[in-house]
């Protein structure tokens, strides 16, 4: 084995990284307030700004009209359409977060969660974030970057 071969086998050509997510104090507080004050699941969307290649900033969250149970959350289609229609178009283009609580369960996504994430990320041309939080303050944040076609699981926050 020569030095070139050794270098190629030991040092990866592309350093893997996971992006990180920052949250405004208000967004973080609002998320934890929702999670800890509801006995059922609750969902939210959020305005996100991509700060640089590795960093996304959740600036604000929005609670949309929804129907919830102890283990599910889904948008109330009729009320959701009216709600989303009130958001200025410039702000609609900033919604890049789908989050919800798992109450006392693990933050591991269900099949329904993954299907919802697929729907949201197919409707964007840049990136989308899925967040799951529980009452133990565990967060799971996944990011899909459409520009690179990469899906990052369990990102830092």
Image (spheres, rainbow, N blue to C red):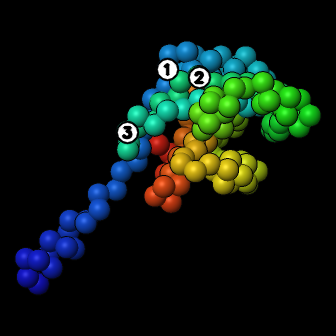
Q: Where residue 85 appears, x then y in whole percent?
A: 80, 29
Do labels 2 and 1 touch, CB within 8 Å?
yes
Q: Where residue 132 appears, x then y in whole percent?
A: 63, 37
First of labels 3, 1 by sequence position: 1
Q: Which residue is disc 2 drawn over?
A: 60
Element type where label 2 sits in the image: strand
Element type where label 1 sits in the image: loop
Q: Which residue is disc 3 drawn over?
A: 52
First of labels 2, 3 by sequence position: 3
- Which residue is pictured at 40% across the width and 48% down the height? 18
Q: How far is the residue under mark 2 from the one under mark 1?
A: 7 Å
- Which residue is pictured at 84% across the width and 32% down the height? 80
In-image side of 142 versus 8 (left or right):
right
In-image side of 4 versus 95 (left or right):
left
107 and 24: which is toward the camera: 24
Q: Residues within 10 Å of mark 2 (few under 14, many from 20)?
A: some
Which of label 3 and label 1 is nearer to you?
A: 3
Q: How far is the residue under mark 3 from the one under mark 1?
A: 16 Å
Element type where label 3 sits in the image: strand
Q: Is residue 30 visible?
A: yes
Quadrant in which the C terminus appears:
top left
Q: Which residue is disc 1 drawn over?
A: 24
Q: Residue furthest right?
A: 78
Quadrant in which the N terminus appears:
bottom left
Q: Where residue 119 appears, x then y in whole percent?
A: 71, 52
User: Is 79 drawn above or below residue 132 in the view shown?
Assistant: above
């Amino acid at each position: 084995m020569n030095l070139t071969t050794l270098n190629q086998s030991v040092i990866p050509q592309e350093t893997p990284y996971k992006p990180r997510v920052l949250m405004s104090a208000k967004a973080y507080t609002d998320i934890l307030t929702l999670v800890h004050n509801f006995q059922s699941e609750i969902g939210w969307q959020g305005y996100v700004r991509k700060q640089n290649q590795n960093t996304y900033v959740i600036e604000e969250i929005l609670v949309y009209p929804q129907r919830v149970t102890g283990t599910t959350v889904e948008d109330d289609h009729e009320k959701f359409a009216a709600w989303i229609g009130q958001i200025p178009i410039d702000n609609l283009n900033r919604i890049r977060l789908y989050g919800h609580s798992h109450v006392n369960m693990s933050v591991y996504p269900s099949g329904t969660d993954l299907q919802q994430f697929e729907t949201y990320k197919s409707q964007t041309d840049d990136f989308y974030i899925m967040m799951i939080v529980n009452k133990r303050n565990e967060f799971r944040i996944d990011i899909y970057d459409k520009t690179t076609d990469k899906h990052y699981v369990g990102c830092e926050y």
